[in-house]
Image (tube, rainbow, N blue to C red):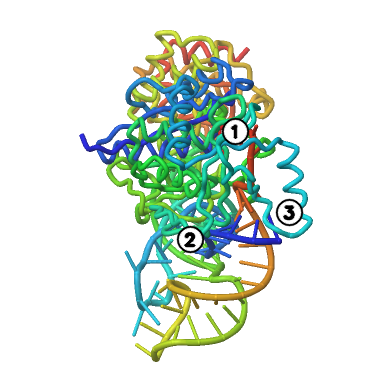
Amino acid sequence: MSNVVTRFAPSPTGFLHIGSARTALFNWLFARNQGGKFLLRIEDTDRKRYSPEAVEAIYDGMRWLGLDWDEEPISQFSRVDRHAKVAHELLTNGAAYKCYSTKEEIDAFRTAARAAKRPPLFRSPWRDADSTAPDVPYVVRLKAPREGETTIIDQVQGSVTWKNETLDDMILLRSDGTPTYMLAVVVDDHDMGVTHVIRGDDHLTNAARQSLIYKGMGWDLPIYAHIPLIHGPDGAKLSKRHGALGVDAYRDMGYLPAAMRNYLARLGWSHGDDDFFTTQQAVEWFSLDKIGKSPARFDFKKLENLSGQHIRATDNVELLQEIEKFVASQHLPELTQRHREMFISGMDSIKERAKTLPELMDIAYYFLGERPFKPDAKAGHFMNTVSRGMLNRLTSRLRTVTWSLEELEAVIRDFAEVEDLKLGKVAQPLRVALTGRTVSPSVFDMMVQLGKDECIARLEDASR
RNA sequence: GCGCCCUUCGUCUAUCGGUUAGGACGCUAGGUUUUCAUCCUGGAAAGAGGGGUUCGACUCCCCUAGGGCGUACCA
């Protein structure tokens, strides 16, 4: 095992955001590719928003996506004492200072700065003051350098430089003594031994600011990789109005986790011209330098196509397991043993007709449903006195058939010839009689699978 | 406002100075076919704009435009 350690650090917002899921996937792929560790940390310091259910939702999403993590997840909130300790160390070694400015003073400063067209970065008067200070609440601020520049070497963004005058003295510890996100992230990443920070590029500026904390503590910087965000189909930031935001929504729509991983990985990362690949291949191929810098738009059509390809490529027994998981997650009636057997025997012909699990189940209606199979609106057009008569004659012939695929096909083709009909003219009413629908797998395949008794019974239902 | 990032077919992308700019999704014209799919064959479709550098730029540099992110005692 290498020393690579990556982490995924979501806030428990109630669901696993699809964009976060991709970030998690990249961290997971990199760790697995390197033979390192992939850790999970829940950023639950905002207690107003915290709930155990929200944390569970993150785990659920991760499990569904098949992103397994190493070691126990870390609760950021549980580490507040450690964060405060680091803040005080920073205070002691002069890398931070106590700031007694009130919110009102800060607001006034910003308003004035804006009016004077100066940067609204707050310049605390306490930065260079004596530590002999009033006995009132204070915040701990980082004493950020005001001269020179800070450069972040990023595996995706390249070398990015900021003038230090554009970086502020950010707050490390709030006036109530709790740590801010900026401090907590740095301390946790360091303590967890994180070697590679792979996260959304909305954090790029934060990397520069956070690097100053590392410097203040004399810690080594992790390797950064800021990946571009995912946008909606219209190019705008992915939001509620684009629909499906959480990975649970994709599970509910019946996409295969493998397809999801494939699609998400391909959004912003490439391996030559490969579009369709297994998770194992993605793990083998993954590298940070093949991640692009521009944001990608979410394309449902492509996801759907990939989902269909994965369904077709999945082993039948495995696919049945996916169906059962889906059925359970949607609280649908459990499959019976007969259903399972029918799925296995008919899978080859139904799986090439479906792009999602619900579609798969819809096509399986011919054995999931129960007799009698009443024709739906479209199918009804195929049932009339003429077709019923034809079907009756066919039924009598079928009673003497031994029901092998070859014989069935031969008999029905011969029957069509005798009736002076094209095969389709026989097959379509037959399909309707057997399934009540105009769309289904091959009638020959279905008949063999359903068995003679069942088919004859359905034909008799239809003749009434 | 300031800072940083981005810009190849409608979409995801390949290309790492020299290609008829390739693939995939989608679209489209056919073929296979008992329906629907699958599958097969073909087609339309791109370097944001303007300057440089160079024998030669999609590729390197600058400017413009457009988009994104950041600029909190949120994370």
Helix, strand or loop at label 3? It is helix
Q: Amino acid at mark 1?
A: Val
Q: Amino acid at mark 2?
A: Gly
> Which residue position is annotated with label 1?
A139
Question: In terms of depth relative to the viewer, which is nearer, A111 or A392?
Answer: A111
Where residue A404 sits in the image (x, y, percent)? 33, 22
- The answer to whether marks 2 and 3 sit on the same chain is yes
Image-based side of A63 in relation to A14, left or right: left
Tag 2–tag 1 contact (CB < 8 Å): no
Question: In terms of depth relative to the viewer, which is nearer, A430 or A155?
Answer: A155
* Name of the residue lying farthest toward the right: A115
Classify A63 as above or below A5.
Answer: above
**Chain under numbered label 1:** A
User: Which disc, if any, is residue A113?
Assistant: 3
Where residue A258 sits in the image (x, y, percent)? 40, 33
Classify A252 as above or below A36.
Answer: above
> Which residue position is annotated with label 2?
A148
